[in-house]
Structure formats: C-alpha cells, structure tokens
C-alpha cells in the first residue's frame, strides 16, 4: 500500500520518474534471512511484496519476538534508520519473502524532492507506536489466555502463517503453554 503510494507519486513526476524509480531495489530472500542485526545501524527501509518478517531481540540467549510484518507493510528499525543509532532488534524473514528496499540516502532524497511524503511516514510511525503501546499494555494486564484470544481475534493471519514457537515468544509464553491454550479452544 505505502509502496504503491510512493511509486504513484513518482510516476506522476514525468521529469524525474526514471531517476526516482531506480531508487527502489526488489529482491527475493529465503526463510531465515537476516536483514538487520541487533546493534547494527539500519541502512534500509523495506516494503514487503510477499512473505513475512519478524522483529525480535535477544534477552540473555532467548529470542523475544515482538512484531510480525506481512504483505503491503513497510518495516525498518525506524529509530535506527532515522537517527543513525544501533538497532535494538533483529529483523529476519520467517518464510520466503520478496521485499523492495529503499536506502537511507534514497529515502532522504525522496523526502527532499516530495515533502508531502513526510505526512505518510509520520502516520506509519504513529501507527507503529500504537502497536507497541497495545502490545506493552497487553503483556502487563492480560494473562496468556487473554493475549492468545486477542491475537486470534485481531491478527488471525499470524496464527495461520507463523510457527508456534515464534507465536509463543510473541505472547510471552512457552510453546508448551501455547499448546495447552490452543487445546482448550
């Protein structure tokens, strides 16, 4: 969706169309491909055409998943990408995925040429902050059963496409606990 909006904006600019369309690089990646490691500075924003990416961080040797991204979503370690600071998490594919990447330099060039795009990116950041706040509150106020029920109601795609151990990590429980919760349904 966002990628379509960007490319449509560029396509309408006949004088600069070719110059700016070349800034986007499409690539196919296999499952378990790391696009960004925790501690590295993010140099790219990704737009998912097909597939799934997950964000996770290492907590004393344990992977903690805190977000999944699917088709038509934009993803990056935005704090790292925008502020040039080390990323707090890793970004990897969990199924074969096709992404379109946009480098930080290209992103800055686009925003300088099309300042109206800033509003779109602000909306993405606000939405992301809302997702983080919702996840944070759910982890505090809800028991594992309630967190699973919310996931089932609000994001059934995760339950259909993501491996159980990643879902358990996302819910803050063990895979065995997740199996018990699913068996109660």
Image: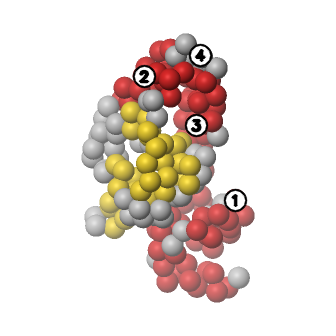
Residue 138 at what x, y percent from top left? 59, 58
Look at the numbered disc 2 and give the secondary structure of its residue: helix
Q: CA distance from mark 1 to mark 4?
A: 41 Å
Residue 76 at what x, y percent from top left? 44, 42
Q: CA distance from mark 4 to mark 2?
A: 20 Å
Q: CA distance from mark 3 to mark 4?
A: 18 Å
Pointers 4 and 2 in contact (CB under 8 A)? no
Q: What residue sits right under mark 2 in the picture?
A: 108
The numbered mark, 2 or 3, whose residue comes first in the sequence reads: 3
Residue 124 at what x, y percent from top left? 58, 36
Disc number for residue 3? 3
Pointers 3 and 4 in contact (CB under 8 A)? no
Q: What residue sits right under mark 4 in the picture?
A: 14
Q: Check the image and report above or below for 55 versus 126.
A: below
Q: CA distance from mark 2 to mark 1?
A: 34 Å
Q: Residue at x 30, y 35 (%)?
A: 85
């Amino acid at each position: 969706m966002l990628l379509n909006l960007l490319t449509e904006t560029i396509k309408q600019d006949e004088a600069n169309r070719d110059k700016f369309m070349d800034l986007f690089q499409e690539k196919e990646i296999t499952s378990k491909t790391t696009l960004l490691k925790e501690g590295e500075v993010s140099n790219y924003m990704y737009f998912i055409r097909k597939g799934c990416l997950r964000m996770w961080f290492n907590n004393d040797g344990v992977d903690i998943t805190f977000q999944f991204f699917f088709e038509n979503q934009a993803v990056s370690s935005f704090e790292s990408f925008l502020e040039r600071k080390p990323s707090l998490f890793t970004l990897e594919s969990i199924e074969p995925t096709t992404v379109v990447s946009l480098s930080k330099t290209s992103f800055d060039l686009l925003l300088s040429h099309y300042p109206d795009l800033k509003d779109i990116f602000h909306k993405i950041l606000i939405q992301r902050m809302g997702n983080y706040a919702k996840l944070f509150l759910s982890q505090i106020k809800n028991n594992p059963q309630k967190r699973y029920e919310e996931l089932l109601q609000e994001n059934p795609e995760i339950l259909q496409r993501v491996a159980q151990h990643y879902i358990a990590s996302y819910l803050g429980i063990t895979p065995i606990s997740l199996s018990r919760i699913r068996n109660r349904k």
